[in-house]
Image: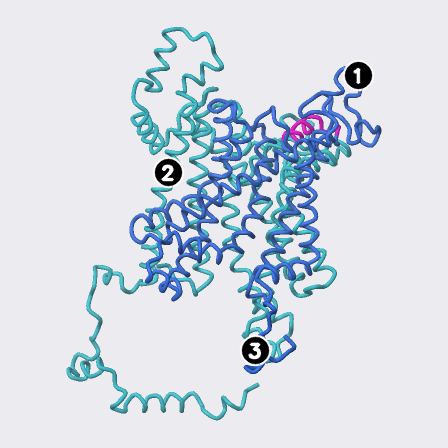
Amino acid sequence: MSAPAGPSQKPTKRRSASQWAVAWRRFRRNKAALAGMVIVGFFVFLAVLGPTLAPYPARSFPCLYIGCTSLPPFQSWAHPLGTEPAGIDVYSEILQSTRNDLYVGLGATLISMAIGIAVGALAGFRKGFSGALLLGVTQLFFVLPVLIIILLFARIFVTLVAVGLGLTLILLILGVFGWPGIAFIVRGEVLRIRELEFVQAERAIGASNRRILFRHIVPNILSPLIVYATLLIAGNILTEVVISFLGFGDPNTATWGLLIQEGFAYPNLWWISVFPGLAVVFSVLGFNIMGDGLSDALNPRLRE
Amino acid sequence: MSLPLCNSISPERAFASSRNFSDSKSHRLPYLHIQNSDPGDEELAEPPQQSLLFLIRGFWPMAGLLSYVIRRLLFMIPVFLAVSILTFLIANAAGSPIDIIKLGIRNLSKSQLAALNQFYHINDPITVRYFLWLSDFVHGNLGQSLYGGSVAAKIGPWVATTLELQLVALVMSLGIGIPIGIYSAKHQYSKTDVAVTSASIFGYSTPVFLIGVFMIIIFSIDLHWLPGNGAVSPYPPYWWGSYFADEVAHIIMPATALTLVSIAVYVRLIRANVLEVLRQDYILAARASGLKERTVTFKHALKNAVTPVVTVVGLTIAGSLAGAPATETVFAWPGLGYQFVQAALALDLPVVQGITMVITIVALIFILVTDLTYAFLDPRVRLS
């Protein structure tokens, strides 16, 4: 502040910039991070409006009986990105898929956050056996071949056990297997903050663990959690693409991975797999760049 | 080159003064009094024996290592059990093995059903079946594939095929990634550095199998330069003339696809590590003593910058056994991941269970070896 704040002067009404304002200022200066945010915003826009903008319904065959199958891209306005041999319109299908893929990415991340915060907080607060057990379970998840187990889960449950659930089932599976990283962050912070004096004081006047968790610990870990969650969304989208590409997902739901799989069956019709592939790369890229930018902007040690 | 500060006190004098210092009575520590009270035993004075470990006292570092390895091996047992229970439960969530067989073969006769019932112990509760399966597994019997043949006999070659691909990709990505990472760090914020960093974020965000799809479309379908299918041609019109050249031709594309993605990870890591090491005081001291920049980079900075990569390399190998089902499927590379996908699609659950368990065990062993290597390379790490 330019004005020297002496004891004789009236205290200035102007508040110092909040943590979030400072972070936003730093984020705004980072060109790459802004580009990532624009990309993410674009895909969120598509996810919200895509099915409305799409000219044909999901998993429909508008070309089947009127002879425009296997159409190359950029040939007609009706099918700007080409069509499949079965008559599916690629452009429409990509728009229909965006919502599904982001739904899985975001939903699975939210579930992972809920489980991760709960487990991490418990493992941090509880001393003795239950804390050690939770820590052991968390470490167990780190050494598991998670992708293989997710694939196995998806294959058995989507085809045989819970047939009707489709995409939501994949969301649940990804969420249930994605929490250990979050739990570790939360546990570390709980262990650190639990011993700080202001928490001890709060405890001395009778605050419960829950109050300490939500009033003091969660605000402190919000920034690493946001960064981790952004990167986790990207990872979940990638895993979902792998699952549906391998044919382990629901064949009746439009997803990018399913479209890539169908295109890979006809490698000389390159447009069927290349355009959804670019959608995957750019959406994941957007989340990754944004996560990197957020981790720079929210890191208090980098603050000048 | 010597600094004046060092000249003023020679090591001998410093040592002598410290000896005088400790001789003064006021600074004597209590245990010295105890020792001096019995001057005859001064040479034999030793800490009391706490445990039988004193038998191997000459090998203290190895004893620490041994107990560490034993503890890690003991930690593997619950992990192993957890994975086995998990896979067994998932595999049985859909029903008993006979339900799965019935999906394919509708008209089983009564005697066939009875034989299958007996073979799979269907009438026993699921816990008993789990322990029967576990005891078979521990004895090396991974069961029979639903499509014939023993699972244990099949898995060996698959592991070898997968490791072949992964090791080639690893050597390529380290061989290219480390120099690029160092160059990028040495020329931070130069145009090359910016290009490398942006390209590596791209590589970070691209799934390997997608690069595989693009490569097959370009190099196999359009240009006919390379085979995009399998590990070797099944019959004689070989690529590039001979059987060996054919194998090389087949491994180029999958290995390159894997490399392009893992290189991105290594470049980011090496760049960050080199930058951090170059900022440290001992590098400043090395430069101040007049060493050439090349010596500082390659003799002083490099070892400390590369050591953390060992962990990532080990974890990559540990994860690579499982981590590439999609890549192997795209290239029809007959490794563990590809066979897992095929078996899962065919609901051949004994094979799926066997592969999952083998992957877990191999991954655990690789993680342990990685930890030990890291402790060996970085003397600051104490195995305790």
Q: Residue at x 41, y 54 (%)?
A: A213
Q: In the visual, does A151 lie left or right of A200?
A: right
Secondary structure, mark 3, is helix
| Above or below: residue B148 compared with residue A22 | above
**Mark 1 is on which residue type?**
Ile
Closest to the observer: B243 or A97? A97
**Mark 3 is on which residue type?**
Ala
Location of the C terminus of chain A by quadrant is bottom right
User: Which of the chains bears the disc numbered 1?
Assistant: A
Q: How far separated are the C-alphas under marks 1 and 2?
A: 55 Å
Marks 2 and 3 on same chain = yes
Q: x and y percent of residue A275 in the render? A: 72, 35
Question: Residue B285's mark?
Answer: 3
| Above or below: residue B16 compared with residue B153 | below
Residue occupied by mark 2? B82
What residue range appears in magenta? A258-269
Q: Residue at x 50, y 43 (%)?
A: B319
User: Which of the chains bears the disc numbered 2?
Assistant: B
Chain letter for cyan?
B
User: Does residue B240 show up?
Assistant: no
Q: How far separated are the C-alphas under marks 2 and 3?
A: 51 Å
Decide: marks 1, 2 in contact (CB < 8 A)?
A: no
Q: Is residue A268 magenta?
A: yes
Chain letter for blue?
A
**Mark 2 is on which residue type?**
Ala
Quarter of the image holding residue B179? bottom right
Residue occupied by mark 1? A66
Secondary structure, mark 1, is loop
Decide: marks 2, 3 in contact (CB < 8 A)?
A: no
